[in-house]
Amino acid sequence: MPFVKTTSILKILRWSYTVPILCYVLFMVMIWMLTVPLKPNIKPKYPLADKLEDTFEIRIKNSNFNSDKAVEPSEEKNEYLVNVNNAENVRKSEKQILTEVFRQADKNNDEKLDSKELSQWIRIKIVQHISEAVGNNYGLFMKIDINPRNGVVTWKEYHAYFLRKRGFSEKFVHSHDERRHKGLQRAIKEQIMRDKALWAEAARTNPDSLTVDEFLAFTHPESSVTNQLVLVDELFDKFDRDGDDILTENEFAVLQTEGHGDETMIVRQDEEQRRHEFRTSIDLNGDGKADRRELLHYVAPQSPRHSEHEAEALLALSDSDHDNMLSLNEILAHPDLFLKSKMVDTARSFHDEF
């Protein structure tokens, strides 16, 4: 009897544990069946982005973005579509700009730009740019020369102005380490380095500060009379073989290079072109010689030769039907070439050269 009672008690205890476990398992199975979603029968929301997802790596472009952290797929697709739309808008804007410039340059309305029309328009843009650069230089100089206002702009003053223009707070400007540039994006650091190099070239009287004209040479080197005088000196050094500060047609047209020992090699390559250049662009009074004043006119960006050379280059690179004229379609076929040229963006073209 005692053995039978013990066995019954063990069975009861075993069932008391088993039943709750079975109930819990059945309950979880029911929950799972109710929560598993049915497969949706809808089209992908971003078919183009899905197709190109393996080809393009899309990242969110902002100053706080961590390049080591992956972007969610939905964010990548959204960003791709935004970039596509932005690129399309940019192309439309560029087309509008080029079309408007073409219409303004086409003075006879024949839907073509010959070299004369192209050159005249480019010269208008150059003169306009130089006038604006010189006219705005003093105002900008005075705006930066504030600490102290002493008639020169120091690098510290300019660097503070540079940071403020890019939206940095006064606290950041005053506490910024100019040697390490901590906290600045790489593109801004690179711009500072370029400015530093241009500053070193422009600062002729004091390496730490710029006068008004030196500041113009720094911001618009093509507009500075000081820079133009340097170019004249370089022409004399290169061509004025007798050192009389007068450049003759023969000196300019016939290039002479030094050889070994007493030997001298005379180079006559493109001599006729150089003689034509001297007669039409340098020798203003036609006496066969050029003094410093004439050479200063020659190197000045307002000189017709700059616009003529630019027009010739644009024609050579984009005149696909070889009729020595440009149509709107030929210009639109080379958007990058014309958008960066003096025909459209004169300031950028000059600054890339200098």
Image: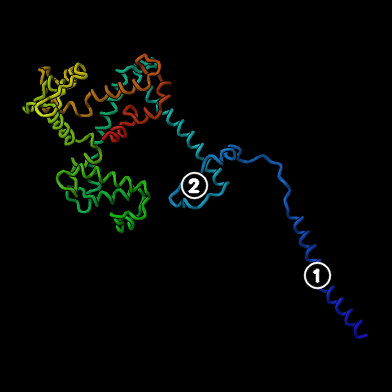
Where residue 241 appears, x then y in whole percent? Answer: 9, 26
> What type is the residue that disc 2 sits on?
Ile
Q: Which SS class for mark 1?
A: helix
Q: Is residue 146 left or right of residue 3?
A: left
Give me the disc on residue 60: 2
Q: Quarter of the image for the N terminus: give it.
A: bottom right
Up/down of 80 relative to 330, above or below? below
Q: Is residue 205 left or right of residue 29?
A: left
Residue 47 appears in which quarter of the rendering?
Answer: top right
Q: Report crowding for label 1: few under 14, some 14 to 19, many 20 or more residues within 10 A (C-alpha).
A: few
Q: Which residue is mark 1?
A: 20
- Which residue is nearer to you in this view: 320 or 205? 320
Q: Quadrant of residue 288?
A: top left
Q: Position of residue 153 (x, y in %)?
A: 21, 48
| Badge count | 2
Q: Residue at x 33, y 31 (%)?
A: 345
Q: Which quadrant of the figure contains the C terminus?
A: top left
- State the image coordinates of residue 119 (x, y, percent, origin top left): 29, 21
Q: Amino acid at mark 1?
A: Pro
CA gap between label 2 and label 1 equals: 52 Å
Q: Residue at x 42, y 30 (%)?
A: 94
26 vs 115: above or below: below
Of helix, strand and loop, which one carries label 2?
loop
Q: Residue at x 80, y 62 (%)?
A: 26
